[in-house]
Image: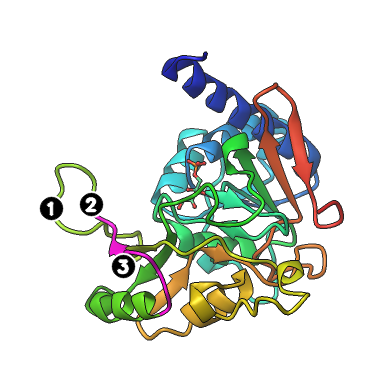
């Protein structure tokens, strides 16, 4: 049986494999505007981009999703630009980001690293959003493997009211995410907000409710991804939610929260690619 160290090394190798393949497939030399997400997998995305060399990357501008990816871009010597400077009517050519869980329909849970709001803005600003992850993130339904709950970014003064509403909706023990060890109080996002983690029973897909035996609209605390997301985003005090859902990335050129492709580094050293047409 693999030791913890061997398992951790396997996970890192698989993230790197997925990142290099995703960049190879989706970063065309003619692209000029690239979104860079947050988390540990994106480190390998930046490594793969840097490996292309200045001949390719010097004409490109890189748009971060928060302070971590801003530092990554700068440390790699890539051109840093901000989504706030992207002119109206313009789009990023492609954006790369990780995920905490990916389901059969390419809905995502994101926000495990507390960066979801800017991540969603950058992903939805791109013509193509590409997700990069390791084999642990591949799951038939959201909430199957990722048990910490759906990350929800909230205005701090609204947190108690939001927690009440989440409990009424059937979330099991939703709570404000604590700060890092040594820091008293809640974690504070790049946007000055708090994060709530709200566990729900595994989220259904449209195909699960086709026969009418389930509605997926919250009865008995059972939700489809879309019904839950549509409800969560309307709670007063919720700034943004860590469900990336809705139209699939191939149906809309930009504005989609779901990826056009999700790359998973697998434990056997292969890379599995999921696209809307293959799910
Ligand atoms: O949403 C995120 C940060 O808020 C990350 O994309 C997500 O948590 C995945 O991170 P990692 O690549 O470290 O597993």
Magenta segment main secondary structure: loop
The circle drawn on residue 193 is 3
Q: Is residue 149 or residue 113 the one in the foreground?
A: 149
Query: 92 above or below 6?
Result: below
Q: Is residue 36 visible?
A: no
Q: Which residue is mark 2?
A: 179
Q: Which residue is mark 1?
A: 184
How far is the residue under mark 3 from the one under mark 2?
12 Å
> How dense is the environment of label 3, judged by Cα within 10 Å: few (below 14), some, or many (20 and up)?
many
Q: Which residues are magenta?
A: 169-178
> How dense is the environment of label 1, judged by Cα within 10 Å: few (below 14), some, or many (20 and up)?
few
- Snapshot quadrant of residue 54: top right
How far is the residue under mark 2 from the one under mark 1?
6 Å
- Snapshot quadrant of residue 185: bottom left
| Residue 124 position in % (x across, y down) | 64, 66
Q: Residue 177 magenta-drawn?
A: yes
Looking at the image, which residue sits at the far right? Answer: 277
| Residue 57 position in % (x across, y down) | 67, 38
The circle drawn on residue 194 is none
Position of 8 compared to 19: left or right?
A: left
């Amino acid at each position: 049986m693999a030791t913890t160290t061997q398992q951790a090394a396997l996970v890192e190798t698989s993230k790197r494999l997925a990142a290099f393949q995703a960049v190879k497939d989706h970063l065309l030399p003619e692209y000029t505007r690239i979104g860079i997400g947050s988390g540990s997998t994106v480190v390998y995305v930046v490594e793969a981009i840097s490996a292309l060399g200045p001949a390719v990357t010097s004409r490109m501008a890189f748009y971060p999703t928060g302070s971590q990816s801003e530092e990554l871009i700068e440390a790699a010597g890539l051109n840093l630009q901000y989504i706030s400077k992207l002119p109206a009517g313009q789009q990023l050519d492609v954006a790369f980001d990780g995920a905490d869980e990916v389901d059969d329909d390419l809905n995502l849970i994101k926000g495990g690293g507390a960066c979801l709001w800017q991540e969603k803005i950058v992903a939805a600003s791109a013509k193509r959003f590409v997700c990069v992850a390791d084999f642990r993130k591949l799951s038939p339904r959201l909430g199957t493997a990722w048990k910490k709950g759906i990350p929800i970014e909230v205005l701090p003064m609204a947190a108690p009211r939001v927690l009440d509403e989440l409990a009424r909706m059937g979330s099991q023990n939703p709570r404000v995410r604590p700060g890092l060890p040594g820091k008293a109080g809640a974690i504070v996002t790049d946007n000055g907000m708090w994060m709530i983690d709200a566990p729900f029973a595994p989220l259904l897909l449209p195909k699960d409710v086709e026969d009418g035996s389930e509605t997926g609209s919250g009865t008995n605390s059972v939700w489809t991804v879309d019904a839950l997301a549509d409800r969560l985003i309307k709670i007063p005090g919720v700034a943004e939610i860590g469900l990336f859902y809705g139209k699939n990335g191939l149906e809309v050129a930009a504005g989609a929260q779901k990826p056009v492709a999700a790359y998973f580094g697998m434990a056997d050293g292969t890379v599995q690619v999921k696209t809307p047409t293959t799910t």
